[in-house]
Image (tube, rainbow, N blue to C red):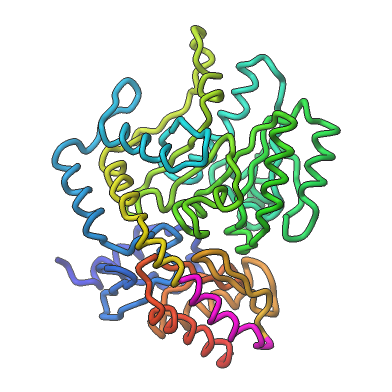
C-alpha cells in the first residue's frame, strides 16, 4: 500500500468531489476503513458516523452478512445485461421487496441510485397516461422537495441553490405548499378541480423532506393527499429513497401512515449502504399499461448496471437484517434522540427540534439556508472531536446506522452541545 499522503495528493490533483466548492472546502477526510458505526482515517482518528455516510448505511459499515453475500456473488456472476437476461439475485430481490411493500406494489424496475429511480417513476407516470391515449402532461410536486440531481429529478425538486444554474432548462411542475408551512391538501384539491384531467401524478417525500431541511410532516396529511389522488385517478409517487428501510420506524414511511402509493422510489439503504442500487416499484395496472403489441409503448429506460447481481445480493442480505432486533435498535435510537433533543431544546440558539424514527434534527438560530456558514463550522468542529456530521446549512441532523448505541449518540450530542457553547 502507498502512504496516505501519496493518494491524498492524487486526490487533490485529479478528483472532483460532489457538493464541494474546491476553492473554499477543507481537504477531504482520508478514510482507510470503516466498521459498524466507526470510520477510521489515515491519520489514526476514529469517527462516529452520525449521518450513515450520506444516509445509506443501515446496519453499520462492513457488515459481515452483507460482505459475505457480496463476495459469494462476485465469484459466481458479477454482471450481465438485464435487457433480455435475468438472474436469481434480481428475481429473488424483487420478490422479497414486493413481500414487504405496501399492498398493491408488485413490479420492480431496477436502476442505479435514487435520482434515477425518480427519473423512472416520472417517466413511467407520464407515459402510462400517454399509452392510454390520455393527455396528462402535468406533475405536481411539493415546495422544498429534493428528488435528485438528474434533470427530471431536478425538475420535480424545489427551485433553489441546487437547481439555480439550470433553471431555464427544467420543465415546469405544479407546486404544492410544503406541508410544514401550508395547506398542501387544499392546494391539491384546488389543482384537481382546475386541471385534474391534465394531472398525471403527484410526487412526495413521505413524512420527511430530507435535503430541503429535514422537515417532518404529519401522517394525516399524507393520507389525505393519497385519498385525493385516488379519488381523482391521479398517480401518487412516493420518493422513499431516504425514508425507506426503517428510517422513520416502520420499513416504509408510507406504511407508517397506512398509505399505499402507485409508485415508490427506493435506493440508499436498499443494499444496506454497501453498493449502489435503485428500484422503482409500481402497481400491476401501471405495469400492464406498458404491455402492448405496439413496441412504441415500451418504457425506454435502462442503465448499463441495471439489477447488477452483486448489488442485488447485497440488497437481499440487507433485507434479512431488518428483523425484530433491528426494530429494537431503531427504537433505542429514537428514544435517545428524544432524550437528547429535550435537553437541547431550551438552548437559546436551538430552534424547532424534531424526531421521526431514527432521524433527529433542529435548526441553529441565525442565517438560514443551505449556504449558511454555521453548517461548515459545526462539521469542522465535530470532525476535530471524533464525529462525522454534515449539516444542511443551519439545519443540524443526526441520522445514524442502526448499530449505533445510546453511548455513541451521547458522544455525538455532547459534541453538538460543546459547539453551541463554543460558538
What residue lies at 81% left-to-right and 38% top-to-bottom?
A: 191
Residue 148 visible to an observer of this rendering: no
What residue lies at 47% left-to-right and 31% top-to-bottom?
A: 106
Is residue 203 toward the left or the right of residue 175 in the image?
A: left
What residue lies at 64% left-to-right and 78% top-to-bottom?
A: 364
In the rendered image, the residue lying farthest to the top is 293
The overriding secondary structure of the stretch rendered in magenta is helix
Range drawn in magenta: 333-348
Q: Is 9 a magenta residue?
A: no
Is residue 349 toward the left or the right of residue 4 in the image?
A: right
Say above or below: 273 vs 5.
above
Q: Nearer the viewer, residue 194 or 229?
A: 229
Q: Which of 211 and 129 is in front in this view?
A: 129
The image quadrant of residue 13 is bottom left
Residue 121 visible to an observer of this rendering: yes
Is residue 287 toward the left or the right of residue 44 in the image?
A: right
Amino acid at each position: 500500500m502507498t502512504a496516505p499522503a501519496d493518494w491524498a495528493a492524487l486526490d487533490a490533483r485529479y478528483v472532483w468531489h460532489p457538493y464541494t466548492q474546491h476553492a473554499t472546502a477543507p481537504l477531504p477526510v482520508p478514510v482507510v476503513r470503516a466498521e459498524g458505526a466507526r470510520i477510521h482515517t489515515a491519520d489514526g482518528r476514529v469517527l462516529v458516523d452520525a449521518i450513515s455516510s450520506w444516509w445509506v448505511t443501515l446496519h453499520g459499515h462492513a457488515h459481515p452478512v452483507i460482505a459475505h453475500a457480496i463476495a459469494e456473488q462476485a465469484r459466481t456472476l458479477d454482471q450481465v445485461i438485464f435487457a433480455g437476461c435475468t438472474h436469481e439475485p434480481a428475481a429473488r430481490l424483487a420478490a422479497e421487496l414486493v413481500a414487504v411493500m405496501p399492498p398493491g406494489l408488485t413490479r420492480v424496475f431496477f436502476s442505479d441510485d435514487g435520482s434515477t429511480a425518480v427519473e423512472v417513476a416520472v417517466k413511467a407516470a407520464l407515459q402510462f397516461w400517454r399509452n392510454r391515449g390520455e393527455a396528462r402532461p402535468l406533475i405536481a410536486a411539493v415546495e422544498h422537495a429534493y428528488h435528485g440531481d438528474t434533470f427530471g429529478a431536478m425538475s420535480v425538486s424545489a427551485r433553489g441553490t441546487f437547481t439555480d444554474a439550470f433553471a431555464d432548462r427544467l420543465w415546469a411542475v405544479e407546486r404544492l405548499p410544503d406541508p410544514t408551512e401550508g395547506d398542501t391538501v387544499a392546494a391539491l384539491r384546488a389543482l384537481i378541480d382546475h386541471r385534474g384531467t391534465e394531472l398525471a401524478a403527484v410526487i412526495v417525500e413521505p413524512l420527511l423532506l430530507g435535503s430541503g431541511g429535514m422537515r417532518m410532516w404529519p401522517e394525516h396529511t399524507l393520507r389525505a393527499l393519497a385519498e385525493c389522488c385516488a379519488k381523482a385517478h391521479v398517480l401518487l409517487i412516493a420518493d422513499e429513497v431516504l425514508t425507506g428501510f426503517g428510517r422513520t420506524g416502520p420499513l416504509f414511511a408510507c406504511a407508517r401512515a397506512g398509505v399505499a402509493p402507485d409508485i415508490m422510489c427506493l435506493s440508499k439503504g436498499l443494499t444496506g449502504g454497501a453498493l449502489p442500487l435503485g428500484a422503482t416499484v409500481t402497481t400491476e395496472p401501471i405495469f400492464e399499461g406498458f404491455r402492448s403489441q405496439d413496441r412504441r409503448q415500451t418504457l425506454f429506460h435502462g442503465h448499463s448496471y441495471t439489477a447488477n447481481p452483486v448489488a442485488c445480493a447485497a440488497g437481499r442480505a440487507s433485507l434479512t437484517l431488518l428483523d425484530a432486533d433491528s426494530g429494537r435498535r431503531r427504537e433505542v435510537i429514537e428514544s435517545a434522540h428524544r432524550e437528547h433533543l429535550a435537553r437541547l431544546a431550551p438552548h437559546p440558539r436551538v430552534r424547532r427540534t424534531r424526531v421521526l424514527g431514527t432521524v433527529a434534527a433542529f435548526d441553529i438560530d441565525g442565517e438560514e439556508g443551505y449556504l449558511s456558514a454555521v453548517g461548515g463550522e459545526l462539521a469542522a468542529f465535530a470532525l476535530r472531536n471524533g464525529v462525522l456530521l454534515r449539516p444542511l446549512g443551519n439545519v443540524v441532523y443526526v441520522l445514524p446506522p442502526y448499530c449505533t448505541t445510546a453511548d455513541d449518540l451521547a458522544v455525538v450530542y455532547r459534541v453538538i452541545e460543546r459547539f453551541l457553547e463554543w460558538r
